Image (cartoon, rainbow, N blue to C red):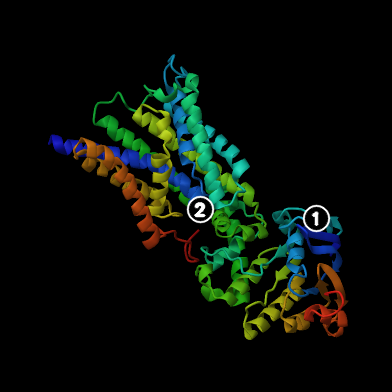
Amino acid sequence: MLELDNLTKSFGGLQAVDNCSLKIASGRITGLIGPNGAGKTTIFNMIAGAMMPTSGRILFQGEDITGLPTHQMFHRGIVRTFQIPHEFGKLTVLENLMVVPADQTGEKLFLGLFSPGAVKRREAEVRKLAEETLEFLTLNHLRDELAENLSGGQKKLLELGRTMMTDAKLVLLDEPGAGVNPTLLKQLGNMIRRLKDERGYTFCIVEHDMDMIASLCDPVIVLNEGKVLTEGKMEDVRRNERVLDAYLGGGEEAA
Amino acid sequence: MDQLYGYFLYGLSLLTFGGIYAMLTLGLNIQLGFTGLFNAGIAGFFVVGAYVSAILSTAESERHLGGFDWPIPASLVAAMLVSAVIGWAVARISIRLRADYLAIATLGIAEILRLTFKNETDLTNGARGVSYIPKPYENMPEPWNQILMAAVVLAIVAVLYFLLERARKSPWGRVMSAIRENEGSARAAGKDVDRLRVQAFVVGAAMMGLGGGMMAHYLKFIDPNAADPTTATFLVFVMLIVGGSGNNKGAILGAILMWTIWSATEIFTSMLPGDLAIRSAYVRVFLIGLMLQIMLQKFPDGLLPEKRLQSSDSR
């Protein structure tokens, strides 16, 4: 579904991503792990169009999408969440969801003002979808609360919820489990699995919680210093000596 | 009786000035209140609107460009359009700047516009300004001319309010607030943030141009001092923040309230003996600044805070 071809991103002298090539297969939950600074978030930013690669290509469903702006990536079906929740703080929870869908008639100023019928019809659809999403997220009781007043975990749920308001094909989750308590973590994992099965989303997850990765992801891609170290099932990756070295800082490469 | 009549006329002037300022605060509310754009160049769009409407509607004069003799409504529309076009050009080059940098850029552009009007003497009569600008209903007997002037201004404000409330409650208003709250997330939700920000900036600039045009017709005179940032930018900011940024009612309330305070303090300072009266003008500016400071610390959301639509509200 998505292919990175010799992707490189350098910040000054630092090669955050260094000739990285990998593939994300359709219909799977791919885990992207690696020690801090391995280039995971940078790769996300480039796929989502928030950062321009220094060189290399990004192919999505066979098409070259390298360097397209974020909103165009979205319209092609690539949706991302953020490591630190990026809620719209002074909008209500319901509005946070309703703002997301594409093709909103009422977002055109003229139509918003002078075509109430068409706007209302589309709003009703969007609202129905938002209400279903709130139900799914178990946030229904907070629909009129300002998003800035939610707890950290609830914001994480809302972050996932925004991806459900789209016709996403590929969903990039940047540390969905960071700062989330174990119960909610389990719940989040179940939601992600359900979204894969029920909606056919392909997921790519960056995560530091290895239990979450082990229970959700197949395959797992390990990055280190901007390169792919290895790829495989979690149980195999776990035993890989180079992976252990990278995480523990040993080995000749890190010297 | 005469005194009462005087108060009545004064009240009308407060409403007229307050209403014209409300056009500016409503315009700023679209930019800052809805979309989070820190436009510190209100004075620039205001003065463009004022000059465009003045020059198009005045009779021929050898002091400045003119002789078009347009009817006032047409020249006001032109004022809005020209301000909008300039707003578009400004936005195109500066809209990607982060909050305070946008403020610096727009402040500079407003100053460029002011100096242009001051120095292009063939076009604008320079520092001596454009006079004999037609005023609506000026041939009516007093007090009807004043009453009708105030009524026209307030009617325009009412129409703007009606439209902007609709816009605020529509998905357009929602996406603008989303951009204000979190630009990155709005982009990740597929919104063409740059295009939408330009749009908000242009609509706001057009309303500032309208306010400028109305002011020129009301005062019958315009000179480059109208673009003084104290009264044309700073005061407008204070009005919106006191009234409630993001709230259209608040924008109008803030404009009329702050104009009343601004104007009424002059009554008291003018009673002071000569030298003090001149100095006290600066105290007024200081007091307005102090008020802003207190509002921001104690009531940062203003007198009428922004309200979000609840799920039970009809849309």
Q: Nearer the viewer, residue A220 or B174?
A: A220
Q: Residues within 10 Å of mark 1 (few under 14, many from 20)?
A: some
Position of the N terminus of chain B, as image quadrant, is top left
Residue A231: x and y in percent read 87, 75
Q: Name the residue located 49 percent from the left edge and 44 percent from the top edge.
A: B40
Residue occupied by mark 2 = B34
Q: Amino acid at mark 2?
A: Phe
Q: Amino acid at mark 1?
A: Thr
Task: Find the distance from the CA under tag 2 to the CA under tag 1.
Answer: 36 Å
Residue occupied by mark 1 = A54
Q: Secondary structure at mark 2?
A: helix
Residue B299 vs A175, above or below: the answer is: above
Q: Name the residue located 33 percent from the left edge and 37 percent from the top edge.
A: B151
Q: Is residue A61 visible?
A: no
Q: Quadrant of residue A38 in the image?
A: bottom right
Q: Quadrant of residue A27 in the image?
A: bottom right
Q: Secondary structure at mark 1?
A: loop
Residue B181: x and y in percent read 55, 59
Q: Residues within 10 Å of mark 2 (few under 14, many from 20)?
A: many
Q: Residue furthest top?
A: B62
